[in-house]
């Protein structure tokens, strides 16, 4: 193993341990929160190091990047990977995205949901999805405004081409992990509210990144999306 690759597996094991510790610390089961390794910008060889350590789920933010990376990784190893799309999805990319990604974290409109459902039914696929919420009303961020989500929720649950796992958020950039806590609390409270008002189940909370995943787990995250703490800083 090269120094780099051993660094990746060391980092991965450290993060997995911290995920388990944060779950236990907050009185949850140690398996209550899943780790999604965010592999955007990294080549298939780096992902193979993570796979060699036994971790098989990856998050990518661009369909175009996944189009080369998924087959490139499959050339190195034939393990069965789970790919999650964590970036914004344009409707004209839905047909390309669905065969690549089993989970999509970034559903932010009824139009996109309709397009995914229709195409998924055609392709006989049924992805898991998260509804992305823009809690802070940031113009630069994608995501449902909470009031739009309240309005659309019943209709979203009528689509047959996907399975709704829960809610996702990307809080505003913060200096300290504690700054993100109020946003994680708000996502959980919105989830609790919607489950009661719409009589639906939204068990999943996709929240928390390298800088704040332990706080997210304390507030109920069921999947954290961690990249740079495992691979190092990205060079775009
Ligand atoms: C890049 C990215 C992450 C991971 O961020 P890190 O700070 O590198 O852990 C998580 N979620 C989304 C949506 C991202 O785009």
Image: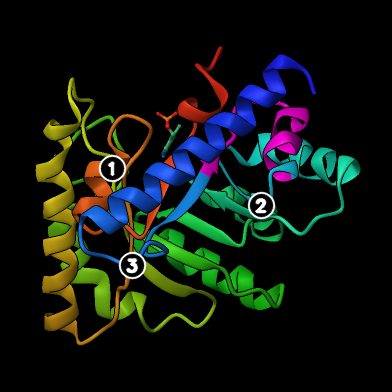
- The answer to whether marks 2 and 1 mark residues whose Cβ atoms lie closer than 8 Å is no
Left or right, 25 with respect to 74, comes to left
Circle on res. 178: none
Q: Could one spot residue 137 in this view of the protein?
A: no
Count of numbered marks: 3
Q: Quadrant of residue 80?
A: bottom right
Q: Which residue is mark 2?
A: 56
The residue carrying pointer 3 sits among few (fewer than 14), some (14 to 19) or many (20 or more) residues within 10 Å by Cα, namely few
Q: Secondary structure at mark 3?
A: loop
Q: Nearer the viewer, residue 179 or 151?
A: 179
* The stretch drawn in magenta includes residue 41: yes
Q: Secondary structure at mark 1?
A: helix
Q: Earlier in the sequence, mark 2 or mark 3?
A: 3
Query: Which segment is the magenta one?
Result: 37-51
Q: Nearer the viewer, residue 90 or 167?
A: 167
Q: CA distance from mark 3 to mark 1?
A: 14 Å
Q: Which residue is mark 1?
A: 214
Q: Earlier in the sequence, mark 2 or mark 1?
A: 2
The residue carrying pointer 2 sits among few (fewer than 14), some (14 to 19) or many (20 or more) residues within 10 Å by Cα, namely some
Q: Nearer the viewer, residue 104 or 81?
A: 81
Q: Could one spot residue 90 in this view of the protein?
A: yes
Q: Which residue is mark 3?
A: 29
The nearer-to-camera label among 2 and 3 is 3
Left or right, 51 with respect to 178, comes to right
Question: In this rendering, is residue 152 above or below 36?
Answer: below
Is the C terminus in the top left, top right, bottom left or bottom right quadrant? top right
Q: CA distance from mark 2 to mark 3?
A: 21 Å
Question: In this rendering, is residue 227 above or below 53?
Answer: above
- Counting from the top left corner in percent of width and height, residue 37 is at 54, 42
């Amino acid at each position: 193993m090269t120094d780099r690759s051993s660094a990746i597996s060391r980092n991965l094991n450290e993060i997995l341990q911290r995920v388990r510790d944060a779950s236990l610390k907050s009185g949850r089961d140690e398996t209550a929160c899943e780790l999604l390794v965010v592999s955007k910008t990294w080549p298939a060889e780096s992902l193979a190091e993570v796979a060699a350590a036994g971790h098989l789920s990856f998050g990518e933010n661009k369909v175009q990047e996944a189009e080369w990376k998924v087959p490139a990784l499959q050339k190195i190893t034939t393990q069965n990977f789970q790919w999650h799309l964590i970036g914004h999805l344009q409707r004209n990319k839905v047909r390309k995205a669905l065969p690549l990604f089993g989970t999509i974290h970034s559903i932010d409109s009824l139009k996109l949901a309709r397009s995914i459902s229709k195409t998924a039914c055609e392709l006989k696929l049924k992805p898991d999805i998260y509804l992305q919420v823009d809690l802070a009303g940031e113009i630069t961020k994608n995501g449902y405004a909470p009031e739009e989500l309240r309005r659309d929720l019943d209709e979203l649950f009528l689509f047959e081409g996907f399975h709704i796992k829960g809610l996702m958020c990307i809080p505003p950039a913060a200096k300290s992990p504690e700054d993100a806590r109020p946003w994680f609390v708000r996502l959980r409270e919105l989830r609790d509210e919607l489950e009661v008002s719409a009589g639906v189940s939204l068990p999943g909370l996709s929240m928390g990144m390298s800088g704040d995943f332990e706080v997210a787990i304390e507030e109920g995250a069921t999947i954290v999306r961690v990249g740079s703490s495992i691979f190092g800083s990205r060079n775009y």
